[in-house]
Amino acid sequence: MNSILPHFGVVSNAIVASIRLDESNVPAEQGPSERTCRTISSGKPVMEKTWRDFGSELANLLISSKMLPFQDDDLERLASAFDAYRKSYEQFNDSLSRLSAPPETLRRAIMRLQFLDLAIRYAGLCLSDGKAPLDGLPLWVHADGGNQFWKGAMEKLFPGLPLVDSIERDGDCAAQLKMNPSRMRRSLYENGFPGVSALRKVVPDNCQHSAALRHYASFNICQKLIGSFGRNEVLTPRSLVNVLISTYKHHLPVETTASRLGRTSPRSLES
């Protein structure tokens, strides 16, 4: 049977690449090795032990990246969640292969449903916490989302200072950060990752630093989706996401708290 969805090893490698960003973020010895990544993405049968080892290494990579507030004692839980998700993904892919619809149609439908599922979870978490969901598209979905992020950070930290390659006496942003001019140019014009050292100087707060790392990881994943499905296919569902969030905001005011949600009847949620 033909596979409708990408082989799970290919998906897993995309996750690894998006989390790692570069070796300044997570050392090469942490996380799955290149050899293991090649093995699981080959499309050939992989032993369960290899998958379990990969899941543990991926969990360790995620913890080490500091993108999310996980601790070392979360390792076993994350590895178990990865294993469960892998098996459900493979079962789902097998079921899809039995359908008669064209593969392209099925892939688009699945991607759109995934975005809507994400929107429901995101809006629900925001509203239960009394926070407003984000209006509009996040910066990381834009074609120059990496560039915009870094330029905005430079303008905020060094207002009026040239960005790079300046001959002025006061120098430029790259010199202030002791950042290689070539890397600065890639970060400004090629959506490159500036490196953890420079990013930490620009965003010293731990929570904001983690958010910045997630921005670059999300940007990388989004670009992979666009490469597979096209920009219109990826961004159109996101407009549906915004409609859904607006609907949630209309029916459940932003100031709603978790306790109030607990007293809200199902009928009022459906109105």
Image (spheres, helix red, strand yellow):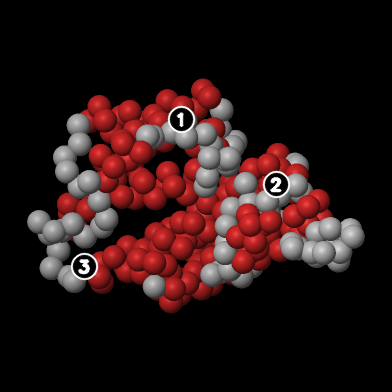
Q: Which residue is under mark 2?
A: 198
At x 27% / y 46%, what residue is drawn? 41
Instruction: Give the mark, 1 or 2, whose residue is nearer the N terminus.
Output: 1
The residue tagged with tag 3: helix, strand or loop?
A: helix
Which of the 4 image quadrants contains residue 114?
A: bottom left
Front-most of 125 and 267?
125
Q: Classify residue 176 as left or right of residue 15.
A: right
Which of the 4 image quadrants contains residue 124?
A: bottom right
Q: Which residue lies furthest to the top in this view?
A: 73
Q: Distance between the residues labelled 2 and 3?
A: 43 Å
Q: Position of residue 63 (x, y in %)?
A: 52, 33
Q: Distance between the residues labelled 1 and 2?
A: 22 Å
Q: Which mark, residue 18?
A: none
Q: Position of residue 192 (x, y in %)?
A: 57, 57
Residue 195 is at least partly visible in this image: yes
Q: Which mark, residue 29?
A: 1
Q: Closer to the observer: label 3 or label 1?
A: 1
Residue 83 is at least partly visible in this image: no
Q: Are marks 1 and 2 in contact (CB under 8 Å)?
A: no
User: Mark 3: which amino acid?
Assistant: Pro
Q: Where is residue 90 in the image (x, y as percent from the top left)?
A: 23, 47
Q: Distance between the residues labelled 3 and 1?
A: 38 Å
Instruction: Give the mark, 2 or 3, whose residue is nearer the N terminus.
Output: 3
Which of the 4 image quadrants contains residue 182?
A: bottom right
